Amino acid sequence: MKIKQVHIDGFGKWHDQDFSFTNNPVLIYGANEAGKTTLAAFILSILFGFADGRGKNKYQQYIPKDGSGYGGSLTVIADQHQYVIKRVKGKNGGKVTITNEKGKKEKQDFLTKLLGPLDRELYQTIYSFNQNNILNDELDREQLEQHLQRLGAVGSQEWLQQIAHLEKAADSLYKPRGRKLSLNRHLKEYEELRERVNQAQSQSSDYHRLVEKQVEKQSELEQLKQEQPKLKHQVEEEERLQRLWPIYEQWQNHQKEPLTEQLTDDEIIKIQELQSRERELNTQLKSFNQQQLEQQAIVKKLSDPEVNDYRLRKAHYQQLKDQLLALQIQKNGQTVNQQEQWHTELKQLAERYGSVNLPEPLSERAVSELEGLLRASAQTNNSQNLFIPGIGIVLFILGLILRQPLVWICGIIALGGAGVLWFKQQQREKQLTEEQNSALQSFGKQHNLTAFPTSKWLMMQGDLHRYHDLRAQVEQADKRKTSFEHQLELIKQQLPVSLTADSLNELINSYQRWLVEMQDQVQQLNSVEQELTRIQRRNDQLTQRLTEYRQAKETEYKSLGIKNDNEFKQLLAQKVADQTRKVTVSAYGQQLTTSDRQQLAHYDSKHSLDAKVSLVHQNLAANEQKQTELETALAQINVQINALVQDGSFSELNQKLTNLQTVIWNETKQWLSSQLAIRWINGALKLASQDRYPKILQQAEKFFAILTADRYQKIIVDDSGISVLNHEQQIFQVAELSLGTAEQLFISLRLGFITVISDQIKLPVMVDDGFVNFDNVRRGRMLKLLNQLAEENQVIYFTANEQINELGSPIINLDRLNKNKV
């Protein structure tokens, strides 16, 4: 989340004032009382609520003195969306409203989602820097882990709410200073009842004698208990010296051992870099060899005989595809319906003439010849001469009419002559007809027409032509079919696989699918072979580089007088041992105080120290044994006292006491269950976020090294507090550091925390004149770190240092704003 705009209606000295935070980091300059702290407090109040005015908080309210409206708003950017957070005077920290960029109000819990698990206290502990809260002598590992649990563990807010619920349940049973709580009341009742039991016991006649004996034993027991801490202290002190003895002995021994260093840091770095490159190249070669084996396996899998055959005869298989398509086109040109029509028409023509084998049609010449024969036959039948009979009939009629015998006789003679002529003509025509019929029969036999009437010979020529044309087309179609089937069979014999299909179309589709499948496999095979070639080429390059690095490493080994990695490892181990010995001597010396050395010097050997430890243990054991004996005697006295008390009221009180003990035990179990659950949840949150803890220290060490010019190299955080290790391997507690260095240490820890947790929480970092104890050099380094931090988080820097004007960055000058208002 980043703050874009600040508007103050009224807060402290500010009223009706706007601030625009366009740069990052935001630099705000102002002299003392210019309103820097007021502006910082306003931002916190809008985010986390106004101070409630109780106790010291009343001085943190900043209620305007001039009666201006109390409150204001922040315009923020979160998750690439803009929101306006407005807070005005009201209950529970003020009335807050959040409006999104569309002018719609968000729900009440939206601000909680924006801030995540942070409250005002935790925000000020981590994200807010000022002179009062930078240095924290009480900061330890547990506090850092608690902060990390609240911010770093997924779902920690729900678990923390569960902890609060358990704490509330536990507090409802018992508090150390509670009065009305159940367990507190029962404990008080138990004490009162115990007092009444004691009073009832005093009624026994032997009670005073037993009490005196009890007091005597109790006094002796108390004396032993008073001596016991002193004896335990002696045991602890001697055991501490016993634990320090190996350190003391090592410190003495290491001081006597000479240090020998043969390797320089530059040589180590150079050789280790060569070894690292060699290992890296070996790893890469191993990876590429594995890839090569995998690709070869794929090539082997894809390179079956069918695929290889296709690769070699790809053009031939494409030609077979074209031939099949050509056959398909040819087949499509021969329609089955047309052939069926031809056969039907042939059958009809055969049925028409009553023969399935019709003769060949006549040629034009034969047709002309037939027409001549038929024409001659027609003329013969029509050649009878009626002229003479006609004259005779006319003359006969005229003679009858005219009654002229001569004319009548001439007519008779004419008719007689006509009869003679007709008879001769009939003989001649009969002979001619027989000749013509003979000629037609001869023509019919010649052209196979005798089975048909002569009158149909000419008319049937068109049908004969059609019949023989159809026969020729059917024969041609049969030839084409035979040729088609022959070509198809030849193509099938050349196909690479046995493709079964009921039709040519199915065969073509199956073959095309096979071609596509082969093309895909060939393409995959080509791709794998290309990848295999690339891997082999990369293998060769890596092998060449590996050879170069090995040669360079051998050259370095030769200059050091060693031969292989093992000898270098031994040489390096010797150097590390020397450095370790040096650090160990220093560390041992720091772990042993002057007093420790003086006390340990009284013992000439570990045996004498062990003897002293055994002696103090015997003294402590004797004390504890005596206490046990006295406690046993006191228990027997108590039994006697209880046996002497026979009063019924005492038994009733004792029963009540027993019942109350049961109630207290059950309530205590409930209280302990809540406390154990709280510890379990804290442990779980610790485990959930423990991987971030080393990262925080690593980041903090980088920042601390930058601020101190690499003077300090390591930060150590444990239950005893915080210490640092400098470049001379010396350990310093925080109290041993200068004020400025201690501040830089705690700033580094907080910046490390902010950097590591920024992947989950990004809130503005506010610095209010937090570096006044820094010198100019370290203040400059701090400002550079803030610029680096501003890459992920918004940084708002308040300062009264005029040197900020020399940075050349835009600043918000509060002094100038105040002058303009006046």
Image (cartoon, helix red, strand yellow):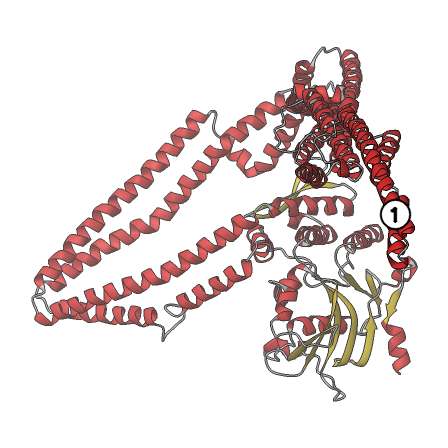
Residue 499: x %, y % from top left: 63, 27
Vertical position of residue 564 compared to residue 79: above or below: above
Q: Residue 375, position in %: x, y?
A: 86, 37
Camera-nearest residue between 610 and 716: 716
| Quadrant where the image shows the C terminus | bottom right
- Of residues 469 and 385, the one drawn nearer to the viewer in this rendering: 385
Q: Secondary structure at mark 1?
A: helix
Residue at 57%, 52% in the rendered image = 145
In the image, taking residue 110 as reference, residue 457 lies left or right, namely right
User: Which residue is at a point 19% across and 64% down the rendered structure image?
Assistant: 658
Q: Relative to 377, is 623 on the left or the right?
A: left
Q: Nearer the viewer, residue 510 or 194?
A: 510
Q: Position of residue 480 (x, y in %)?
A: 75, 28
Residue appearing at x 90%, y 44% in the figure: 388
In which quarter of the view is residue 266 placed? top right
Q: Which residue is mark 1?
A: 409
Q: What residue is drawn where x is 54% and y is 34%?
A: 598
Q: Residue 572, position in %: x, y?
A: 68, 20
Q: Quadrant of residue 23?
A: bottom right
Is residue 285 in sight in this rendering? no
As drawn, is 757 to the left or to the right of 385? Answer: left
The amino acid type, in three-letter code, at marker 1 is: Ile
Q: Residue furthest bottom?
A: 67
